[in-house]
Amino acid sequence: MAEVTIKLKKSLVGRKKDQIATANSLGLRKIGDVTNQPDNPATTGKIAKISHLVEVVK
């Protein structure tokens, strides 16, 4: 299955609780954290919610 690599580029400090929860569910806690996630609709929705905070590499 295809995977997508996600990197947290901006801080979660001062963000809305739902955005912090979304980042945490992807395994992103601190700036610079990188995670590989399956490329499926659920992951795509999470990325869309916090697109201004992350960088995506397919």
Image (spheres, rainbow, N blue to C red):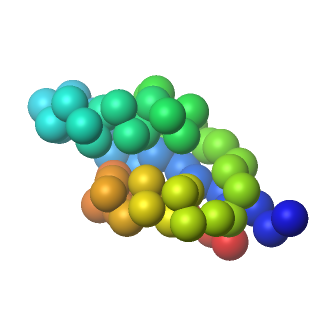
Q: Is residue 58 left or right of residue 30?
A: right
Rendered view: 15 above or below 5: above
| Residue 55 visible in rendering | no
Residue 29, percent across and down? 46, 27
User: On the rendered image, what quadrant is the N terminus found in?
Assistant: bottom right
Residue 18, percent across and down? 25, 37
Who's the residue at 56% across and 33% down the image? 27
Q: Which of 52/3 is in front? A: 3
Who's the residue at 65% across and 43% down the image? 35
Rendered view: 25 above or below 36: above
Name the residue at the right extreme: 1
Q: Is residue 55 left or right of residue 57?
A: left
| Residue 19 visible in rendering | yes
Who's the residue at 53% across and 57% down the image? 42
Q: Which of 29/40 is in front? A: 40
User: On the rendered image, what quadrant is the C terminus found in?
Assistant: bottom right
Q: Is residue 45 left or right of residue 33?
A: left
Rendered view: 40 above or below 24: below
